[in-house]
Amino acid sequence: MNAINFFKTKKLDLIVDFYTSVLALPVWLNQDSCIIFRAGNQLLGFCRCDISEISGTITFFCKDRKEVDAIYSRLKAIAKTAPKPNLAYNIYNFWAADPEGRSLEFQCFDHQLEPYITLEEGLKTRRSIRKYKSEPVPEELLNKVFELCRYSPTACNLQSYYYIVIKQREILEKIVSLRGPSGKPILASPYAIAVASKGDISHRKIQDACIAAYHLMLAAKAYDLGTCWVTDMDKDEIKDLLGIPHQDYIACLTPIGYPAEHFPVPERHQVKDFVRYL
Ligand SMILES: Cc1cc2nc3c(=O)[nH]c(=O)nc-3n(C[C@H](O)[C@H](O)[C@H](O)COP(=O)(O)O)c2cc1C
């Protein structure tokens, strides 16, 4: 089940202009007298009416303080306060108002969160992360990620893939020395994960392992964890270090951890550049 919060408004045109041009929210559904915006995981509807509902607060939350500050510098004219930490909730926030006086809050949580991002947002914002915080991901959270990995597709549903969580630095360092300098991202987080598939189970071990690797990356993203595909790991010396049979296939190793960097998506091709309809 999903949900929409609706507000009545006497000034629909003004409100639509504000949420579109000032807050840059995309319209999810236009029903003429009711316009529904999407703000990440939240749908917000405004309906033309002879009264305006302005009670309550619409809270927008960001990834980090830098993003809150960036929004504040854009919205200074309508801000009621400057951004500051609120220790009671372990957040960093500032307040503003929309043209009808609805209270708007912009904040980030200064602590880890349960998943909240939509699949679409996850797909758009997943990045290869090569800098991590030193705090390791608790096994409980890793297991939540692996729980999502159960749903990776495999040829004939043979489920040939498996994951090895590598915590020992010496092993990771040996792998990097065998792999070469571009393998270094696996040393950037406290743990790395090898994604492999069983050669004796599937004739599609390469595809199964590659999909399982990307499935892991998206599952990690759902919990706001970072990963980075580090390739060229399907080597017997690396398999020996990890106790992997030579007939199996290693799709990649990836660091996994709390990102210590956030950066925008690099230039991508347009749809017209890579889609052809016959
Ligand atoms: C098949 C494959 C191999 C990759 N190999 C490496 C690698 O060996 N080392 C590395 O740092 N990044 C590696 N990457 C990550 C890419 O550099 C990264 O996906 C690309 O630059 C796009 O950036 P993004 O993932 O942040 O969108 C690999 C990605 C893929 C899909």
Image (tube, rainbow, N blue to C red):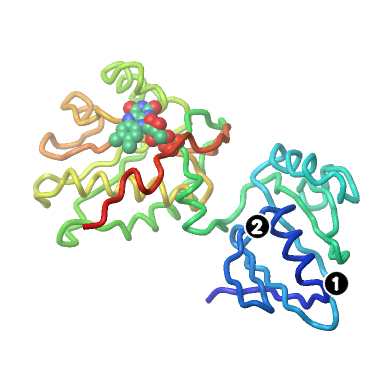
How many dots with numbers?
A: 2
Vertical order, 105 against 72 (above or below):
below
Q: Position of residue 224 (x, y in %)?
A: 53, 47
Instruction: Please give the residue where the numbered disc 2 appears in the rendered image.
Output: 25
Label 2 or label 1, whichever lies nearer to me, is: 2
In the image, 98: left or right of 177? right
Callout 1: CB less than 8 Å from ligand 1: no
Residue drawn at the location 77% of the way across and 65% of the way down? 15
Q: Name the spot of residue 145 as percent of width and height, x first.
A: 43, 52
Q: Does residue 35 appear to the left or right of 145 in the view shown?
A: right
Q: Residue at x 87, y 46 (%)?
A: 77
Label 2 secondary element:
loop
**What residue is shown with label 1?**
55
Reply above or below: 148 against 261.
below
Which one is nearer the viewer's eye here, 162 or 58?
Answer: 58
Residue 37 quadrant: bottom right
**Residue 167: in sight, yes or no?**
no
Q: Reading the chain from its start, which is encountered first: label 2 or label 1?
A: 2
Residue 95 at least partly seen: yes
Does the residue at mark 2 contact the one at mark 1 (Cβ under 8 Å)? no
